[in-house]
Amino acid sequence: MGTSIKLCIGNVSLSYSKNFMRIDYGFLFQEGDLFRRKTDSIDYGYYEEHPEEKEEIDEAEELFARTLSRILPRLKVLGFSLDAARAEYQTLVAEGAEVDSELGEQKNEYLTFEGFCNLACRYPLNDLKSGYIKYETPDRDMLSQGRFAADIDLFERIPGTDNSDFFWSETSFLSARACILSAESMLQVFGLNAANAEAEVTWAFGPIVHAGCVQREAFQPGARQNQKILIATEGASDARIIQRSLDILRPDVADFFNFVDGDERHHFWGTGNLVRFAEGLLRIDVLNQVLFVFANDAEGVDAFRKLEKLKLPANMRAMLLPDLVEFRGFATRGPEGVSVSDINGRAAAIECYLDLRLDQYPAPQVTWSNFKKDIDAWHGVLDFKESYSKHFYDQPDDLLRNGSYDVSKLLKLIDALIQQAGLVTPMI
């Protein structure tokens, strides 16, 4: 019969394989997601009679588990999105229509992607019944469909499910008749129902390891090397602030990011050297995924535009720190004295995204320093910026997560970075 391995959400199967791994889903999980749970593949009665062999159960019960709400951010970093799921669905619709045409069959119109999503999310996954309905049971098919029996005509309008009649419960019916997309896309679809946020995504690999089909070492959590993105910044402070912010404020995705250098011995100081670093990577056709991050000031904008002209390949991307409403009315000082200015694109270095409330210093202020002719804008620098950085580094992790330190701008920064990271495409 063989031994199977399944990726599930709740009790709905998203991906299935027998006697081998097929797809490595370890990247969906992180350290701390490993658990042991009882499995139907173990004859527990046998081990009660042979207690000397009970240690084998530990291996068989292993699985990775994580809630959907903590899986979706990881998929976002990798570029999986609802738009990608829509494109995948529309491809299946086109293929189904082509087959219908070749066979000369007239079928009901396929569901739109929105209709498909509404049907898949009709009921919270944790509310679905998974109890086995025996084949000898009268009206077995209808009973197995459960609440979905009322929508059977809609399920018939999903492409690619003509032979999906192997089901015995509500959960198995939904798996057989609706889970037609890749697991990553189906997770996006199920994420549309807020009630599914705490539904558990599990990858139960223990039985297949216990059966000797796959070595235990093959099942590891965390981002794979080819999925990681190298973050290249103008200086050490930028790298350190971004890295710490990810580790503390977005730990569910922090393992996807590497940094050129996180200490004070930064390889290239300033925008010019960062652009030259990018040019060097282009010349050697580097295959790594790289995201170049520039400050949202005049020098950063100037360098960013120069990098855009290089026509970076799909595995490289450049971004500016995001424009923020908070920077539209910022105190500035120049030749004409103190005024209020929009510092987006002119003086918003990474320190501006920190908590700028320091009792021992005056209110935050930018001083204009030099004019950048290429972009027709003045470049400015935040006064006492090193003090704001030191204040950030001095904060305990817990205070940054839940304390009085204002991380609102940092959250906008790292969420913009995660969004850009999802647009970087790995080289095949």
Image (cartoon, rainbow, N blue to C red):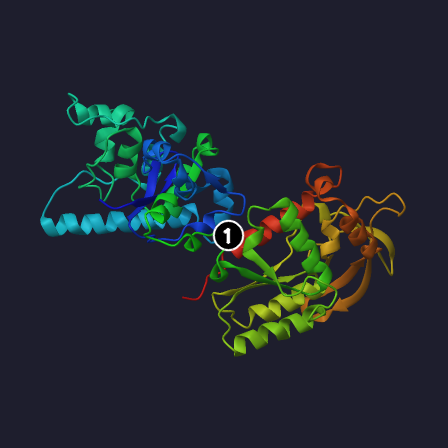
Residue at 45% across, 63% down:
426
Name the image quarter holding residue 202.
Answer: top left
Q: Nearer the viewer, residue 156 or 22?
A: 22
Q: Horizontal and vertical percent for residue 84?
A: 39, 50
Q: Is residue 138 left or right of residue 2?
A: left
Total residue callouts: 1
Query: From where the camera sits, is residue 191 visible?
Result: no
What kind of residue is marked 1? Gly
**Quarter of the figure that contains the N terminus:** top left
Helix, strand or loop under label 1: loop
Q: Horizontal and vertical percent for residue 236?
A: 72, 63
Q: Nearer the viewer, residue 244 or 373?
A: 244
Q: Nearer the viewer, residue 29 or 338?
A: 29
Q: Horizontal and vertical percent for residue 157?
A: 23, 37
Farthest top residue in view: 138
In the displayed structure, would residue 54 be above or below residue 312?
above
In the displayed structure, would residue 254 be above or below residue 107?
below
Q: Is residue 349 left or right of residue 146?
A: right
Residue at 26% across, 38% down:
176
In the displayed structure, would residue 10 be above or below residue 213?
above
- Give the labeled residue for mark 1: 222
Query: From where the camera sits, is residue 34 visible?
Result: yes
Q: Is residue 166 left or right of residue 127?
A: left
In the displayed structure, would residue 316 be above or below residue 94?
below
Residue at 26% across, 27% down:
132
**Quarter of the figure that contains the C terminus:** bottom left
Q: Estimate how packed mark 1 is, as few (under 14), some (14 to 19) or many (20 or more) residues with alpha carbons within 10 Å.
A: many
Farthest bottom residue in view: 283
Q: Horizontal and vertical percent for residue 110?
A: 24, 41
